[in-house]
Amino acid sequence: MRMRMDMRMPEAIVVYVGGHVHAVEPMSGQTLWSTRLPKTYKQSIGTVLVEGDVVLAGVGGRLYCLDIYDGRLIWMNEMPGMGLGMVAVATPAGSANGSAQAAQQAANAQAAATAAVAASAAAGCC
C-alpha cells in the first residue's frame, strides 16, 4: 500500500477527451464543467495545463485558453503555418518538468536533513 505524503487535493482535475476539456471534482469524480473546443475532432489527442486561473489546451496545432472556473473559452490561437500536429504546452511556472524539479528538490532536502541528523548523532556519541 502506498502512503500519500501530501494530503492536499486539487480543486479540479482537468482532462481533454474527444474534442472537449472537462473539469472534474477530485473527490467525487463529478463533472464540474465541459467545454467543446472549436475546430477539434473526436479522435484528436490534446494536452492540458492549468496555470493560475486558466486552462491551456493544445489540440490539433491550435492553442486554447479557458477559464478554470467555468470553462469559458477566453481565446484561441490557430498557430498559422505550423500545421495540425501534436501541441506540447508549458509555462515557466507550470509544466511536467517543473513538477519533476520540485519533487527532486524535495528529495534532496529530505536527504540533506537525514544526513544532518546522522552526522549530529555520530558527533554526539564519540
Image (cartoon, grey):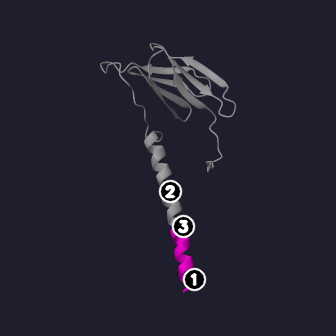
Which residue is more in the foreground, 73 or 105? Answer: 105
- Which residue ends up furthest to the front in the rendered image? 1
Query: Residue 51: where, in percent of width, then height?
Result: 52, 35
Query: Residue 42: where, in percent of width, then height?
Result: 48, 14
What is the three-letter code of the residue carrying label 3?
Thr
Which residue is more in the foreground, 35 or 15? Answer: 15
Specify the label residue 86 is tagged with: none
Q: Secondary structure at mark 1?
A: helix
Relative vertical location of residue 88 with respect to residue 80 in this rendering, above or below = below
Instruction: Using a 10 Å C-alpha cutoff, classify the residue at mark 3 as few (fewer than 14 neighbours), some (14 to 19) or many (20 or more).
Output: few
Relative vertical location of residue 1 with respect to residue 56 in this rendering, above or below = below
N-term-proximal mark, 1 vs 2: 2
Which residue is more in the foreground, 16 or 94? Answer: 16
Check if residue 42 falls in the magenta segment: no
Residue at mark 1 to residue at mark 3: CA–CA distance: 15 Å
Span of residues in magenta: 115-126
Residue at mark 2 to residue at mark 3: CA–CA distance: 11 Å
Residue 27 lies left or right of residue 97; in this view the side is right
Query: Residue 106: where, in percent of width, then height?
Result: 52, 55
Residue at numbered disc 3? 114
- Which residue ends up furthest to the left in the rendered image? 81
- Mark 1 in CB contact with mark 2 (< 8 angstroms): no
N-term-proximal mark, 1 vs 3: 3
Residue at numbered disc 1? 124
What is the three-letter code of the residue carrying label 1?
Gly
Identify the residue shown where x is 56% and y is 18%. Answer: 35
Residue 46 lies left or right of residue 15; in this view the side is left
Identify the residue shown where x is 42% and y is 32%. Answer: 89
Residue at numbered disc 2? 107
N-term-proximal mark, 2 vs 3: 2
What is the three-letter code of the residue carrying label 2?
Ala
Q: Secondary structure at mark 3?
A: helix
